[in-house]
Image (cartoon, helix red, strand yellow):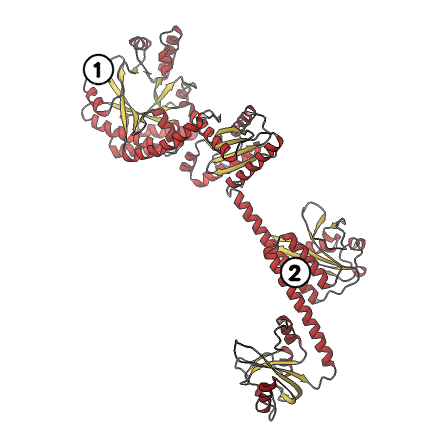
Amino acid sequence: MSDPGLDPLVLRALFDESPDMVALSEFSGAVIDVNPAGLRLVGLDALPANRLSTVDFFTAGGLEVSGDVEDALRATGHWQGRTELRHFATGAGIPVALSTFVVRRSGRGPDLIATIVRDRTRGHRRDLELLAAATSAERIAVEQQALAELSALAVTASFDAVLTAATNTAATLIGVESAALARHSNPAEPFLSIDAVTRSLRDDVVVAAGDGSLTGYALARSETTVCSDIDSETRFDTSAMSTMGFRSGVAVPITIGTGLWGALILFGRIPHLFGDGDIAFVSAVAGVLSAALERVELDRELRWRSAHDQLTELPNRAGAYAEIDAALARARENDQRVALLMLDVDDFKIINDSLGHDAGDRSLVRFARRLTETVEPGDMVARLGGDEFLMICNHVHDVAHAERIAECIRASLGSSTVEDDDDPVPVSASIGVVVSEPNSTRSELLRSADLAMYRAKDTRAGHAVFDSSDLYDADRVRSMSVDLRRALAGGDLNLAYQPLIDIATGQIVSVEALARWHHPKLGSIEPSEFVAVAERTGLATLLGDWALTTACRQLVRWRETVHQSVRVNISALQLRDPAFPNRVAVALDTTGAPAGAIVLELTETEWLSDNGTVASNLAALREIGVALSLDDVGKGYSSLAYLERFPSISSFKIDKTYIDALHTTRGRDVVTAIIALAKAYGVTVVGEGVETQAQLDVLTAAGCDLAQGFLLGRPADAEHTTTLLTGTRPSSTNT
């Protein structure tokens, strides 16, 4: 018994299954454990909490483990003899034969005594029972060892390897010819798929679902189903088993966290009585397979999540990068080209800031759905992050082909569709397009598409194809955005003011505030450039708030001595922000500037749209008391149409291109018509960019109200403008 080579599983099974009493005790006589047969023999259900001594088990005058017995155990490790046990319930004596020996526990505590007690009243049956117990113990040990090995595979091996090992092990240890897995791979089909087939099972046989087969029956009811002999089976159709030459079988359902997955099935060629032990073992194997499936499903879920965006379920940056690499490899092999289209949602920040991130998320999901509806089979749409998406297009012929794809995308996004609720759906995006060359790399294409996308956003062109000049622009934008943020925080920007005069009286009636930035290294930066950088890099709000607040403070100082108004430029992007009227109100409150002396000039009118937010903001600004003016009327789109849509607009400026054409008959006629139309709407007209007396004379004759330009006064800082405002008429040479 002290042989270290004996399997502990076998020893434990022998202890539990032995028909004879087996007890463990210490040399002190304290009983540690008694097997089930021993407890039944002496009339106990279990050992009591207060530990018993060996003397408690024997009748009066019976044997105690002491004296000669103890000497023999110490000397030889073994003693045999006869005595009488006491039945704890009745007190009756039970004649028994004892075999007592020492179990060594070197290094882990004192030696133990093991005692096998054989009931002498049971006769010859004891040997057969002990043999049966030993055989059962050996089988249990083998099955437990097999389950341990399968469990180890379930943690580390591929699922196919686990399936093969599980079916082979189950068939071998149960003693049947074949095993397999069956599942409903497609619930719409009336048959099951068979996997991990062991030998002797044909994989071309159709296994019916439902009551059409043993497996279908078990899966339909989600319960273990046993067929001992097909001749006596009436619950389900056994023709498939008969066709394969099987007479018996068992099917055990396999479940995972998401529900029923399939079944482990075993088949025998002869009738087979599947005992409780067989069913328990097959169920345990099914449990191992369930654990392996859970691990596989978890691995698959983790891999999917690592390559997909959680919000839109589109491939994420990692998934897109892998697809670009694969697409470029295919293109090089087949002498083809790949196009990348980088998309940035227009004005998404306004949706997010005004309606909240939840509404923003829902809008991105809908935007992603519209994109996927436009993609060709085999192409990919991915979300790189935020409001930036990427489309990977294979089999693109040339740049013109890629541009057509971009145009189709924009048309699809802009099409009106009925949605389930009032959540916003982005209807436009700026798209950067790049087409691969034979030696293109993923990083080069991504950078190029990104640069082209920013140019498309800056130029409002909808889409732009990458050009090598974009590389210089990108580096300048990145460095300039950092410096601009620093300049805004440090107060390094300033405003210049250009006067507007009343043509009829020659008096200065207002000044326009114009942002100026003198970069410490680059010198003076054109407003058109740093304003575009601000819009691209999220600084537009900071820049706009700074300009408005600074102009309001200066206005308050001027109005201590002169009655003037100040015009401040705002972009349509600001006007489409629902929070903009509140920011205007805050600037007025903090500076004390009168609302009636502020005119907001709307630039980039081609970006205005007749939507609820713009109309609401215009109404809110009118309630505050500020005036609104359209800048660059006639440029690009017909801005005069906004006079009809937005009656709160009180003035507009004629674009300089029309002023420059006043020396021609056509130019004079057009400007005269514009002024006449403005008069019909009752708005004030400003001619900007006036540089000659002849231009001013034409505007005067046509009835223009106000004029602005180098002829009448150049932009100047606040100090020079203060001096100018104390006079009555600006000099044409004013600098």
* Identity, as a three-letter code, of the amino acid under mark 2: Val
The residue labelled by disc 1 is 729
For marks 2 and 1, the one nearer the N-term is: 2
SS at mark 1 in the image? loop
On the image, which quarter does residue 156 sit in?
bottom right
What element does badge 2 sit on? Answer: helix
- The reply to whether the C-beta atoms of the residues labelled 2 and 1 are less than 8 Å apart is no
Q: Nearer the viewer, mark 2 or mark 1?
A: 2
In this view, the residue in front, 541 or 440, is 440
Place of residue 566 in the rendered image (x, y in percent of width and height, measured from the top left): 27, 24
Residue 151 as seen in the image, left or right of residue 208: left
Position of the N terminus, as image quadrant, is bottom right
Mark 2 is surrounded, within 10 Å at the Cα level, by few (under 14), some (14 to 19) or many (20 or more) other residues, namely many
**Is residue 616 visible in the rendered structure shown here?**
no
- Whole-percent x and y of residue 345? 47, 32
Q: How many marks?
A: 2
Looking at the rendering, which quadrant does residue 99 occupy?
A: bottom right
Q: Amino acid at mark 1?
A: Arg
Residue at mark 2: 285
Above/below status of 713 relative to 23: above
Tell me: residue 145, above or below residue 589: below
Quadrant location, the C terminus? top left
| Whole-percent x, y for residue 312 in the image | 52, 40
Q: CA distance from mark 2 to mark 1?
A: 100 Å
Residue in the image at 57% along x and 90% along y: 66
Compared across the picture, whether 409 is left or right of 85 comes to left
